[in-house]
Amino acid sequence: MNNSKFIVSAVVESDLSHKDKLFSKNNPWIASGNEFILKDDGNIGNVYLKELLNKNNIEIKTRDQLNKIDADLELHFRTAGEISNKNSYLVLPENKFVYPRHENKKILNNFSKIFTMHDDDVDEKKYFKLNNPNITKLCKISGFKNRQNLVCMINSNKYLSKFSEFDGYIERIKVIKYYEMKNKYFDLYGFDWQNPYAKNTLTNKILTKLSKKLNIKKKLINYKGITASKEEVLLRNKFCFCIENEYETNGYITEKIFDCFSNGCVPIYLGAPNITKHIPENCFINMRNYKDLSEINELILKMKEDQFFDYQTNINKFLKSDKAKKFDYKVFAETLCHHIKSDLVN
């Protein structure tokens, strides 16, 4: 690469990520109203991306910080902002049912390269595989020690933007309702579960908006509020329900299952149909293999500690493998850096 410094403009939707906060460990991760929480990993994927680009004589800044300076390349996170450069990348960290603009061909055709988790879209010409960044650290194999709680779930009370019969938000509500009837075993964390919800996408959307407008509250027995640290919760629990926002998209595997892995908590997973192509099935409990929640609840209640040890051992074996490296934050940053370098030099 020559000695001239290249400039990359990062385009984001949220004002909370402007002023280069996108590349800060204090970048807000999940927000509701005026409240937000940070990622346990300190936003390491984007922090490392900036460091890696800087080492390669490439400066990346959020668009609002460039003061109309012409960038050599634009990096859009989701379909944020207008495209003003022929070298424009799009990073899709979410599902099209959460962000329907992600399947708008008129918008997508304007990008030179698109990076996605979704296996079926990847062609290695315009669409390239890119998993969300994770810390793939080994868990401590300690069995049930200090895990006083049976099972938890850490998700916000939200809804899909577009209807899908494979709606993960609705499946989470089924879990909540099941354990509310039992009144034990289960702890729920996340934003806005004090608001009403329903087992129907449209009804849930209407209820959410009305409850916020009219200040309608719902009291859940198992709701523990917002947690500032997933790690603290997962270390206290033997199991955690990890249900993706939508569960019929190949390759759509988010941080949920890896948060469990790194904390030695066994995931109860519902997500990508081809999950076992990427992660061995002996690392998690696959919800697709059980007829209902009662069967899953009976399984985890009766599980012996030696079986739990086996899950933790299998998790670490996977995390040491080449398959796991594809989900690591370093690969996330190195993949983007490689493409950016190649296109700017050529």
Image: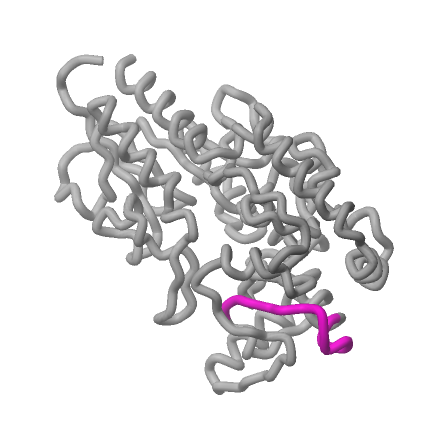
In this rendering, position of residue 259 left or right of residue 281: left
Q: Residue 64 versus residue 176: which sits nearer the camera?
A: 176
In the image, residue 110 lies in the stretch drawn in magenta:
no
> Is residue 170 among what the camera can see?
no
Residue segment shown in magenta: 179-191
Residue in view at x 50 percent, y 27 percent? 127
State the image coordinates of residue 192 (x, y, percent, origin top left): 51, 73
127 lies above or below 242:
above
Quadrant occupied by the N terminus: top left
Looking at the image, residue 24 sits to the left or right of residue 292; the answer is left
Looking at the picture, tell me which residue is in the foreground, 184 or 95.
184
Residue at x-position 59% and y-position 26% = 321
- Observer-nearest of 142 and 344: 142
In-image side of 115 versus 48 (left or right): right
Q: Residue at x 63, y 48 (%)?
A: 142
Residue 233 to residue 284: above or below: below
Instruction: Estimate the x, y position of residue 17 in percent, counting from the top left.
Output: 30, 52
Between residue 333 and residue 143, name the one nearer to us: 143
For the question of whether residue 263 can be seen, the reply is yes
Q: How many marks?
A: 0
Q: Residue 119, image x and y in percent?
A: 61, 31
As for residue 188 lying within the magenta part, the answer is yes
Q: Is residue 333 left or right of residue 245?
A: left
Q: How is the image coloured?
A: one colour
* Residue at image location 77% in from the left, 46% down from the top: 306
Q: 221 above or below 17?
A: below
Q: Where, quadrant-wise, is the C terminus in this rendering?
A: top left
